[in-house]
Amino acid sequence: MEYLVVALMCIVFLQTRFMELRRSTILLGVQSAFIAAACLVIGIAHGGGLHGFLPGILTILVKVIFIPFAILKVVRGLKDEREIISDINVNYSTGVAALALAMSYMIIDRLLPGFEGRDILATAMFMIMTGLALIVMRARAIMQMIGMITMENGIYLLGLIMTEGLPIIIELGVFLDVLIAVVILVILTSRLRLNFSTTDTNVMQKLKG
Amino acid sequence: MELFLYAACCYLVGVSTFFFPRIYQVEAHYLSNTAALIGSALVTIATGGYYAGSLATDSLKWGTYSLAIDGWSSFFLLLTGIASMITSLYALGYGRSYEGNRLRNLGSNWNLFIVSMVFVLLAGDGFSFLLFWEIMAVASFMLVNHEAYIRTTWNAAYQYLVMTSLGTTFLMIAFLIVGAYSDSYSFVDMAHNSLTPQMAQWVFVTAFLGFALKAGLVPLHIWLPQAHPAAPSHVSALMSGVMLKIALYGFGRFMFSFIPTWSYWWAAVVMLAGAFSAFLGVLYAQMESDIKRVLAYSSVENMGVIFAAFGCGMLLKVTAGGHWYLIAMAAALLHAFNHSIMKVLMFMSAGSIMHGTGSKNLELFGGLARRMPVTAVCTFIGSLALAAIPLTCGFNGEWLALQGFITLARSSSAHDIRLLTAIAMILLGFTGALALGCFVRYFGIAFLGRERSEIAAHAHESDKFMLSAMSISSVLVMAAGIYPMPLMDLVAQAIGANTRMFTANQAMWWGTSAYSPILLLVVLAIVGGVVYLFASTAKYEVKEVTWNCGTDPTARQQYSAIGFSKPVRRAFDYILQPVRQRSYIRKDHAYFGRQLEYKLELPDMISRKLYQPVQKYFVVSSAFLRRLQQGSVRLYVGYVMAAMTVVLIWGAVIK
């Protein structure tokens, strides 16, 4: 489990470095695969069975296969998407991620001293904060989607470690939520491209009254 | 109670006339106003039945919602029933002038307005009260906004909407505080609350602000002189005659049931707010030359008198004890009823003038008495009543109020109370004198003398519905003035005073002394008859044109409305702060061949000193908020992130 967590941290740090849409999306798939692995590990540790495996399998189906492919499909339509004008420098996002990691450890040490899953908890929090930071610091809609799913993965990990297995109905609900959010975002991105011929969300400021 | 539900059905029939096809709009108009008439008659009958019956508290419940009638609300129900009956009769004629101009909306909103007022009074719990209160506000907003194509009307309506929402906010706070300290939100439970004195103070502050706003007390009155002239006349009649009184009903409900242990300063605040409203209201009424604005400011004045009397009653109860306070409370209620019928009469006559001339500018009228004789007589009676002349109903309430103040002054030798009473008496004295001047001006300029314009020369009398409605209310005004005893019994019941105790305890009441309208009438009749018999000048009378140095008098030699009120304007220069502009259009010579242009503006002191700074503050602060609201999604997510970080760190630090 510890190895998984360290790998996740590395992947999220890498995520802040990547500006190219295709590579970011693939990395997101890898990140989700590690979450799915963590999910399966915890499921086996709790005795397996349908309830142990189902969340992991669902994660693989939805987050590792469906979402990255959906995003990739959109990305393929954005061949000449090259602008990096309104994006904030990558080094800042990595810096924010580092700060978030330090802050997560400090907060967890203070709030739950001696908690055995300290690293997992810190990683989850780190992912949430970094996902938010990615949404704030990236201008392109696809990158913001990736930020959102990173955040969602962090929340999922947090739920996994804190509750040691949610009721199946809630997990299904969470997956459905993410699925719908992604579908909406994909549609929104295509509309953005149609109307503004770019996916830079800063152009939406023109809509303000 | 069932009768009230039948009345509600009548009103709902009236509301449903909105769905009539356009070609039947006149039929819809007659149906809706007849429905309102019948419904109001049923309300009056039902209230009468309540009085005739055992006077037990009657109620009806659906879950947490309930309807109830008791002594306090029944008095206002009677007032609402009578006033809306008369105005609905008037609306049958007056509404016709809106044919082709959203006539069906007018009829259905009219019914909605009346039914909401009836049910505000019938509401037996806080939620239904607020619900119907809001329906009342929305219905009256739509009625004020009826002529929305006029820019000032539109402005007035939206100003009214903003102000009334503000008032409702205060009321919600008041109800929620009382409700939080009671078992439930029904009025019966709210009367047995466990409010601490500290919280009771807050209840008083919020309730007083909320109801004073609806009642139009200074400085919360600014919507009133805008909204009343903008609305169709029968609507302004009902708004002024009944809706303002419902604020008194609500305030009394809070004061008598929910927070019955009053503080000294509450009473002083209510009394002074009332007295200042009365004075400022009549002062501005004197200055206006729009007839409906005159009446609207006069409503501010009369609500001021009512609240001053109410405050005086509170002060008497807090200090002197005993049953002395009932006299001032009786004054407040009696004047509420009287003001309702006389203000309904005056707004109807103003509507009749507008109908006959097409204008509401006092400066254009003159000599209307010859062309509109019935309207003239009715307006004369209404003016007498509003100027509080004896033998009309307007006098009784004010006389009782002054009795209350005198009782207050005599009841205590404390300096502060004497000072308060002196201030209130001075203000009310000014009010009485200025009201007299105001209505002399109103009647004299409009109905006497010569025509000041073409429109006055071509004025025509109104139709029979309007005339009969005005005549009925004139008769009521005189009847309530000459024989007020039955009305007084109702008042005594409403405030829980025993009529017999009332006469025994106060030696100043009709039964035994001081003011007896019937006696006065008899004496006046005898004196008048004697004078007529012995000093009749008929033999020597010669009818001629007024001597005018050999030339014919013209309309321009009469007092103008602005000129008539000039002495008052000069005397109260400090308060009114008029802006005068006089310039020569043509000046051939120092003494003749001159043409002057005279402009007079009365910027409303309160809106300039109080409302405009607030408005400015909001505009400036929203400019600051615009900087936060950049419209960028990333910025908003950034705010979320910042908030989350702060909460996390804060949580960790607190731990």
Image (tube, coloured by chain):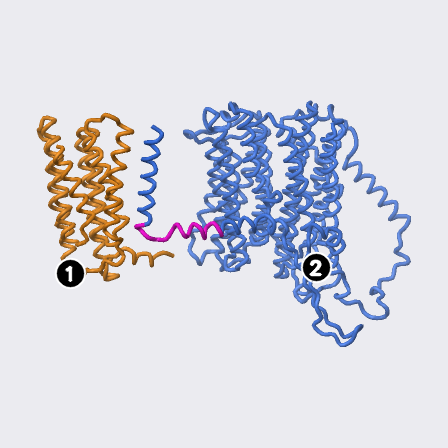
Chain colours: A orange, B blue
Residue A139 location (% of width, % of height): 26, 54
Residue at mark 1: chain: A
Residue B251 location (% of width, % of height): 58, 34
Asked where in the image residue B335 lies, by quadrant, the reply is top right
Residue B600 location (% of width, % of height): 68, 60
The image quadrant where one finds the C terminus of chain B is top left
- Judging depth in this view, the residue of A71 and A26 nearest the camera is A26
- Judging depth in this view, the residue of B269 and A116 nearest the camera is A116
Q: Secondary structure at mark 1?
A: loop
B579 up-or-down from A126: above or below = below
- Kindly identify which residue carries mark 2: B368
Query: On the picture, is B398 further left or further right than B202?
Result: right
Residue B233 location (% of width, % of height): 59, 52
**Residue B177 covered by magenta stretch:** no
Q: Which residues are magenta?
A: B620-634
**Residue B630 covered by magenta stretch:** yes
- Numbered badge on residue A79: 1
Residue located farthest toward the bottom when viewing the structure as drawn = B588
Residues indicated by labels 2 and 1 sit on the same polypeptide chain = no
